Image (spheres, rainbow, N blue to C red):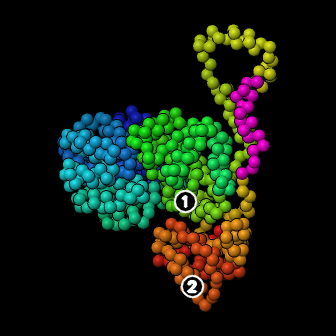
């Protein structure tokens, strides 16, 4: 690939053998070209080496001023990139990498910068602080790397990025690495990049190929009970449960711990020391389940997650892509699970279109299902247990004597019962938590402007939520993000159906979509009209809910 012997030796010692797809495309390109680059790749696909190896190779070791600035969203990712690049340059002793980030004394970081460094890795807030103090000079950098740029924008760093990028030299190579391409990032690339080349290991805004997407439908009040059953059904689970708010994160984690699960919480109210402690335990597999908000989990780099569980679906589909991308990393497979209720059903269809993946509805396991799974997991573990003859030999004669009156069959029965009675008792007569619904048509791999199922399954059935039976609900792919208001929704409907009078019920405007009640008898005509309608040059996606 054109890498020098010193780097090949360093990465060989790290265990690198073959490049990942994004490395295979990016490394040769960056060694040969000085054009700007936009690279799309999911989290955990080796992006750091994709930009780090070719950049480290091209550094001037005699120049101890910053030649590379790498911006990333979180302290944890900043430290990880710094550690990785230092390892890549292990056989190039004159290369120094310095990390700068918030939550740590700035004086120490200033001292490190004074010693000189060719590579500076930092979070936007701390980098901007150092620039304002004139303790960091990036006026002569040759490379600017924006890693997980979409995360930085979603965390509100756009103004910081603008301020930093405006101080960088015109003649530099800008490298933008991201899993998704939100509109704000298009604006950044148009403003600060010059004719960038795009490379990708998959489609934009799509889910990873080795991640399965499952959802369970329950009543809202049964969400926590369903979560426990899912966790019990996967005894070897090592995963993250994502919640919407800090308080919900605390509540769910507290309940899990009180119920005997090996869990803990990660949220914004923790001090940095508490956060480091929890994340350290999780990385070392001392915790089985981490309950977290999206913001708190950013920068958490763990490659062996088996499951990601969405206790709540995120408002932004791109957040779902990031969540699900935390499992199925480093060539492993994973499962992204969503626990939803009836009124969220259309959100699954929206996500299917967004990531071009099929979501499979699963049944919440019954008590019998869980007991069977747990029992066989226990037996498998016993079969795999290594026996230390030397350690247990002194105790065996007494144990044999105490148990000699039991037959082999009786011994197995009593052993299993001793380990398993609490599960059998807990799940005895456990109720069915599943909400029965009519099978739906998947939105997976379907064009938004094709005719879709309009058979009235979106009826609201007068079950106490205040909606009228004569209305059907329609989801439209415009929302607050498009500056929608009830008035603009009504104008949109009027313009798409001139000369027709259609009664409109409640209007619910979310971030990326809106749900509108229309007269049931006009439902098909409204769907047909809206599918032929464009808004700001974009064809609308419309379906029944």
Q: Is residue 116 left or right of residue 48?
A: left
Q: Is residue 427 above or below residue 482?
A: above
The spot of residue 214 in percent (x, y) is: 63, 52
Left or right of 83? Residue 244 is: right
* Element on which disc 1 rests: helix
- Residue at 58 percent across and 64 percent down: it is 350
Label 2 crowd (10 A; few <14 / some 14-19 / many >=20): some
Is residue 203 at all visible to an observer of this figure? no
**Mark 1 or 2 closer to N-term?**
1
Q: Could you say which quadrant of the image residue 373 lies in? A: top right
Residue 432 included in the magenta stretch of the image: yes
Is residue 373 covered in magenta?
A: no
Q: Kindly identify the residue that appears in the image at 58 percent across and 74 percent down.
A: 507
Q: Magenta span: helix, strand or loop, mainly?
A: helix
Could you say where residue 168 lies in the image, as x and y percent from the top left?
24, 58
- Residue 422 image position (x, y, % from top left): 71, 33
Pinpoint residue 234: horizontal percent, then vertical percent: 64, 41
Q: In front here: 543 or 44?
A: 543
* Occupied quadrant, residue 108: top left
Using the image, tell me which numbered label, if any, was put on residue 218.
Answer: none
Residue carrying label 1: 355
Eyeballing the image, is 456 above or below 35? below
Indicate whether 51 appears above or below 523.
above
Could you tell me which residue is drawn at 65 percent across and 29 percent down?
381
Mark 2 lies on a secondary structure that is helix
| Label 1, label 2: how far apart the Cα atoms are | 31 Å
Residue shown at 55%/85% (left/top)?
495
Give the magenta-colored segment's residue range: 414-433
Residue 26 visible to the viewer: yes
| Residue behind mark 2 | 494
């Amino acid at each position: 690939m054109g890498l020098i012997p010193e780097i090949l030796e360093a990465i060989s010692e790290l265990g690198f053998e073959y490049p990942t797809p994004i490395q295979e495309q990016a490394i040769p390109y960056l060694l040969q070209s000085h054009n700007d680059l936009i690279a799309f790749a999911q989290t955990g696909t080796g992006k750091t080496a994709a930009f780090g190896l070719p950049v480290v190779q091209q550094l001037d070791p005699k120049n101890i001023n910053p030649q590379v600035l790498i911006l990333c969203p979180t302290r944890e990712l900043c430290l990880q990139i710094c550690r990785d690049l230092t390892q890549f340059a292990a056989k190039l002793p004159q290369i120094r990498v310095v990390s700068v980030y918030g939550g740590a004394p700035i004086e120490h970081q200033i001292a490190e910068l004074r010693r000189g460094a060719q590579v500076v890795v930092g979070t936007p807030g701390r980098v901007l602080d150092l620039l304002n103090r004139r303790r960091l000079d990036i006026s002569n950098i040759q490379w600017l790397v924006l890693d997980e740029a979409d995360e930085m924008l979603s965390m509100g760093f756009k103004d910081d990025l603008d301020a930093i990028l405006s101080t960088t030299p015109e003649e530099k190579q800008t490298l933008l690495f991201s899993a998704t391409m939100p509109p704000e990032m298009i604006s950044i690339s148009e403003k600060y990049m010059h004719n960038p080349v795009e490379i990708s290991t998959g489609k934009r805004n799509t889910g990873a190929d080795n991640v399965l997407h499952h959802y369970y439908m329950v009543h809202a009040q049964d969400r926590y009970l369903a979560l426990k059953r899912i966790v019990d059904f996967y005894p070897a689970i090592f995963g993250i449960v994502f919640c919407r708010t800090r308080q919900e994160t605390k509540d769910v984690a507290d309940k899990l711990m009180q119920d005997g699960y090996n869990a803990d919480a990660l949220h914004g109210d923790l001090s940095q020391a508490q956060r480091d402690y929890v994340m350290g335990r999780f990385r070392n597999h001392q915790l089985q389940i981490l309950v977290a908000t999206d913001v708190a989990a950013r920068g958490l780099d763990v490659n062996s997650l088996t499951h990601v569980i969405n206790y709540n679906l995120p408002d932004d589909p791109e957040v779902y892509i990031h969540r699900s991308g935390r499992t199925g990393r480093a060539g492993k497979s994973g499962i992204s699970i969503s626990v939803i209720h009836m009124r969220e059903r259309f959100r699954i269809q929206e996500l299917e279109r967004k990531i071009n993946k099929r979501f499979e509805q699963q049944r919440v396991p019954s008590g019998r299902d869980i007991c069977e799974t747990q029992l066989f997991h226990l037996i498998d573990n016993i079969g795999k247990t290594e026996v230390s003859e030397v350690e247990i030999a002194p105790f065996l004669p007494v144990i044999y004597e105490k148990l000699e009156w039991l037959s082999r069959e009786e011994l197995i029965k009593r052993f299993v019962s001793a380990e398993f009675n609490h599960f059998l008792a807990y799940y005895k007569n456990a109720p069915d938590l599943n909400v029965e619904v009519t099978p739906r048509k998947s939105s997976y791999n379907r064009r938004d402007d094709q005719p879709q199922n309009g058979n009235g399954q979106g009826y609201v059935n007068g079950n106490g939520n205040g909606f009228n039976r004569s209305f059907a609900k329609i989801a439209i792919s415009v929302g607050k993000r498009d500056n929608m208001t009830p008035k603009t929704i009504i104008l949109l409907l009027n313009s798409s159906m001139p000369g027709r009078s259609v009664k409109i019920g409640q209007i619910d405007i979310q971030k990326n979509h809106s749900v509108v009640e229309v007269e049931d008898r006009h439902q098909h005509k409204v769907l047909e009209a809206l599918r032929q309608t464009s808004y700001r040059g974009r064809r609308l996606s419309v379906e029944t809910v």
